[in-house]
Image (spheres, rainbow, N blue to C red):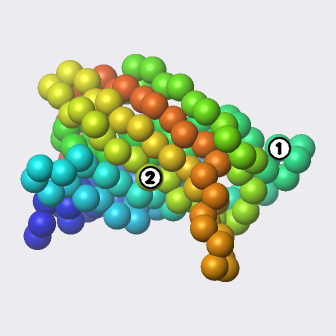
């Protein structure tokens, strides 16, 4: 099993363990799509999100708070998988570029620095187009996550 396959398995186990609890992260329903963590490369993950009617704003686009939550969960899951530790958000910033309209979205996360105490990452949220058109970049985020040094919930 490759390093990337192990991370995908770790993230899938984290999502599964979270689903056994009743909290907001479960509402999002993020799915891990890919994880690339080969030696020498910047670790990268992609997640899928399917729009839920309850997550729309008055303009039939994803609510900004939902977009922020999607970014937080996606960046946090990969940070936990890479460090093999529970993490918590240190800080995040967002840029909303286009209304996030559509049914399916892809979130691409790059983990620029994975340290003993802190993980730094950036993310992009795309509306997935069904046709020949290019996916639309709707929002970007930057985040830092504290490494807590506690076992992952899927392993505890």
**Is 84 left or right of 137, judged from the image as shown?**
left
- Between 141 and 51, the one lying in front of the other is 141
Question: Where's the N terminus, which quadrant?
Answer: bottom left
**Mark 1 residue element:** loop
Residue occupied by mark 2? 108
Marks 2/1 in contact by CB < 8 Å: the verdict is no
Q: Residues within 10 Å of mark 1 (few under 14, many from 20)?
A: few
Dot placed on the residue nearer the N-terminal end, 2 or 1:
1
Q: Position of residue 55 (x, y in %)?
A: 74, 48
Number of the label disc, if any, that sits on residue 94: none
**Is 64 left or right of 147, judged from the image as shown?**
right
Q: Marks 2 and 1, how far apart in space?
A: 23 Å
**Mark 2 residue element:** strand
Q: Position of residue 104 (x, y in %)?
A: 63, 65
Seen at 23% across and 47% down, the residue is: 42
- Between 18 and 122, the one lying in front of the other is 122
Q: Residues within 10 Å of mark 2 (few under 14, many from 20)?
A: many
**Which is in the foreground here, disc 2 or disc 1?**
2
Residue occupied by mark 1? 57
Q: Is residue 117 visible?
A: yes
Task: Establish if 47 lies above or below 109.
Answer: below
- Between 65 and 98, the one lying in front of the other is 98
Seen at 85% across and 52% down, the residue is: 60
Q: Position of residue 116 (x, y in %)?
A: 15, 26
- Between 122 and 62, the one lying in front of the other is 122
Task: Establish if 150 lies above or below 53.
Answer: above
Question: Where's the C terminus, which quadrant?
Answer: top left
Q: Is residue 20 visible?
A: no
């Amino acid at each position: 099993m490759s390093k990337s396959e192990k991370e995908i398995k770790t993230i899938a186990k984290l999502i599964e363990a979270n689903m056994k609890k009743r909290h907001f992260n479960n509402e999002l329903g993020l799915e891990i799509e890919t994880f690339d963590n080969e030696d020498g490369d910047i670790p990268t993950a992609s997640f899928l999100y399917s729009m839920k009617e309850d997550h729309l704003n008055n303009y039939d686009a994803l609510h900004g708070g939902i977009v922020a939550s999607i970014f937080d969960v996606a960046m946090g899951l990969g940070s936990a998988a890479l460090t093999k530790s529970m993490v918590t958000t240190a800080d995040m910033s967002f840029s909303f570029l286009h209304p996030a309209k559509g049914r399916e979205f892809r979130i691409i996360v790059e983990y620029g620095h994975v340290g003993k105490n802190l993980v730094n990452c950036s993310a992009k949220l795309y509306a997935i187009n069904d046709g020949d058109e290019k996916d639309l970049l709707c929002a970007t985020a930057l985040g830092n996550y504290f490494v807590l040094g506690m076992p992952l919930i899927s392993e505890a």
